[in-house]
Image (cartoon, helix red, strand yellow):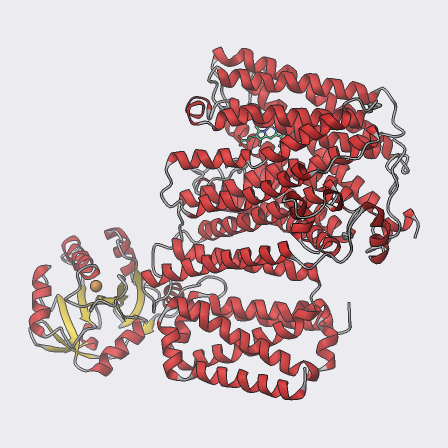
Amino acid sequence: MRRIARYKLLLAACVAWACLWLPPLRSMLESDMTLHMTVQLPLLTAIGVMLAMVLRPHEPCWFADADWLGIPGVLLAIFTTSLWMLPRMLDLALGNVSIDLLKFASLPLLAGLPLGLSWPRVPALGRAFLWANLISMLATMGGLYLGAPQRLCAYYRLDQQSAAGTALVAIAIVLGLAWFIVLFIGAPSPAKPRSADKSRINERFGWGASHTFPRS
Amino acid sequence: MKRGFIPLLGLVLLIGVSALARATDGFQAVTSDGARQLSVARHPRSIPDVRLIDQNGHSFSLADYRGKTLLVDFIYTRCPTLCGVLGNDFHRVLAAMPNKQLDLLSVSFDPANDDHEALKLYGDRFGATAPRWRIAVAADRRGLDALLRTFGVVVIPDGIGGFVHDGFIYVVDQHGRFANIIEPNASAQMIEAAMRPAKP
Amino acid sequence: MTTQAIGTSRGGIDAGIAVRAYLAVTGIVLLLMMLFGFTMRLAQAQWINIEPNTFYMILTMHGSGMVGITGLSGAAVMWYFVRRHVPVSTGVFVANLVFFLVGALLILGSGFIGGFAGAWTFLYPLPEHSGGLWSANAAAFYMLGLLVIGVGFLLLHLDVLRGIISVYGGLGAGLGAKQAFGLAPEKDGPPPAVAAATMASISNIVGIVIGAVVLVLMLVTLYVPSFTFNTLLAKNLIYYFGHTFINVTIYMAVIAVYEILPMHTHRAWKTNRAFYLAWVLSTLMVLTVYPHHLLMDFAMPTWMLIAGQIISWVSGLPVLLVTAFGALTNVYRSGIKWSVAAGLVFIGVAGWAIGVIPAIADGTVIVNSVMHNTQWVPGHFHTYLLLGMVAMMLGFMAYIGGGRAPSRLGPAGLWTFLIGGAIFVLAFLAGGAASVPRRYAVHLPGWLPYDRVGVIGAGLVVIGTSLLVTRFFLALRSPMSGDGIR
Ligand code: HEM
Ligand SMILES: [Cu+2]
């Protein structure tokens, strides 16, 4: 990315961060469980991903080295996000400004940033696996909120809780469908796959000549 | 595998697992209710000496209850639902253990609407008579907030003019400590068990 | 690069050995599970005496074990053939086997140590309400075992799709969607193995993701009883997962038909428009129809439950039709030289086709109210699983490891398996028609004739399968057997 563009992105991230923290937006997003879980938390994480895009050229060597296949970074992001999905942590953040501040710091810096830095290092199969898990975990959380007969958060009503559950399930379904559609359409075929070309394809992937029919 | 991977992975796991463990009190509580239950059972909390005014307009203090077991619930008198259940529960407790060294206290968290007239009406609905069963408001806002904070009670607007709140009964022991929590719909035996004095 | 290098070009693990390891595990587990089935049949026939609780534990283990092992061997068939066309990772393939073995251990432990007997369908909330027969931990081990197995399959299917996308560009192209709708010439379409692997992987990924949701939800409710969730929804999610997984075993095994028959007839498998259309339609049905029906089910009327069952069978119908038709035209007047492998895969197509007929009968509402929950149901699914899926898979096994084995073992095994299988499923179907209920440990005297005929059939199946599996193991001694890779 060009330097100017990087500064613009950094500025955008900081402005978004500040806006989310300022009372009108913060109290609005936190007043409702659905907004809190499906808008504020993801936006905070996204800010971290933006920071990662800005900071990538300055990423310390040791981290780039030690972050093998992006595993530590992604794991850190998973820990951080699951922490803030706990009903108790939502309650604490609402009842206590310093904990809310912790949320505002940790989601960008300990979830979005490591995620953004590590993601390019994750192999394709790993990314697909993470997507599948994200979808299933969102639906699971949604299912729990929908099914719980009592309130799980002291600060949210039962109807808000089940609305949040529905929203999580809906997001999971939309993400799943979107993923499927993108993969279904895919890119224009990289090689016209005809049986005559098979050996060429195999060569391209380092798989050697195609297999010949056995004597049966 | 690259250099530094294992140490970094170890660090992330350490931080992540210990943060999750802290946030869930050792993987035992994912909700605030659960966490409060654990914390109270482990370390009973001493309650602040708040001044309150009961349904007859008499002023009293929480310290007056020292030496007796006190059951507390939090209500507002206009409540169409849960507070009626809580009132019935207290009525049942009194009927089941008439001679016990036991007092009851219903604290209103809606002082703006609950004057002592309203408190009295609520008390009469369930046969409450002071001082055995007081229906009271805190003398000032700070007192109420201190009470709500100590008991970990959260009250939120229900969006139609009333409040959403919990249906727990809170046990304060002879030493003036918040020592136990009774689930809604608990049986008389469960309530008795919850009132048994814990280790001092 | 030489053929030798193919196997070791990734991760240093030899693909040929990996496939053989899959089949060796399959051979052993399959026989063990068949012996469990045989034991149940013996008990129902009152030729041996076992406690009802033990019966239900065995039923649970038989159901889960069979579904698991057909999934595993189906994956081996799919992977072996699809890797001729697209790059796939041997490491992931082996990882799936490891996950499977770990999960299987957890499940066996939950049954034989923990006494879990909530059936392979583990319908919520049964695992939590055992009436003291098993503990929450036993149920949790069972569900954890399923989750672990699910992780392995998820990785494998994702890797297969990744390989397909890397060659064909997208899943649509992998299925031959353009060919299906006449937008591209048929001859440019993907090989049948690729189309089938695409469909099977998509379906199983969706099924596993949904299965993971319901399993984690159930694990949470197991330990935090204040969480509950809608039982009807849970049932639908579980059935979606279970039906998909078991149906996909057939879609994977059928690749053996597409690849092995042409080798014997020396005719390419015809991949025409109908073929692609069938696979596209089946994919779309699996993806849209059933989940759609899940979404609106909070108070689901019975007819919808039944419709859901029909759909889950009918969704395979297009594929079944093109496969049966394709197999017949491939063989017809081809001057085929039959081998054990070709014979078994051909039996597989027939068994699948025949087994689906009673399934559809069961699905129709009127028949359903009479036949459902009778042995008609195990009758039809054993037809298309045992005589369909397992036959195809045994054909694959014979193809991989048959070359040097004693020549009479194979035909003897094939015929014993076929005759025994026919008797065995007919006994179930006849019992069902006579209203013998399924899942009963203790049978009334009037039902015993069906059970006893069933025992004879089951015994023959066990013998026939043992012969075929023995043949495979004997062939393992000579590592370079007929299949050409190692
Ligand atoms: C020798 C071969 C086999 C025998 C003797 C056998 C026997 C049995 C018996 C007796 C039952 C219980 C029927 C009842 O409900 O009364 C059963 C159920 C079942 N079998 Fe098999 N079976 C065999 C092969 C297979 C195969 C190859 C599969 C493949 C997936 C399979 C899957 C199942 C399933 C899913 C159930 C239902 C379990 C339940 O109701 O929870 N079986 N089998
Ligand atoms: Cu109330």
Q: Nearer the viewer, residue A179 or B118?
A: A179
Can you say whether C85 is above or below C426 in the image?
Answer: below
- Give residue C235's quadrant in the image: top left
Q: Is residue C5 visible?
A: yes
Which quadrant: the C terminus of chain C?
A: top right
Residue at (61, 88) in percent of width and height? A7
Q: Residue at x 63, y 23 (%)?
A: C38
Q: Position of residue C353 (x, y in %)?
A: 63, 26
> For the point 77% across and 29% down, which residue is it?
C469
For the residue pair A60 and C283, the one nearer the viewer reads as C283
Q: Is residue C232 left or right of residue C408?
A: left
Residue sitting farthest toward the right: C2
Q: Quadrant of ligand 2?
A: bottom left
Q: Is C200 left, or right, of B188 in this rendering?
A: right
In the visual, does C192 lie left or right of B68?
Answer: right
Q: Is residue C346 above or below residue C12?
A: above
Residue C350 percent across, percent down from the top left = 67, 24
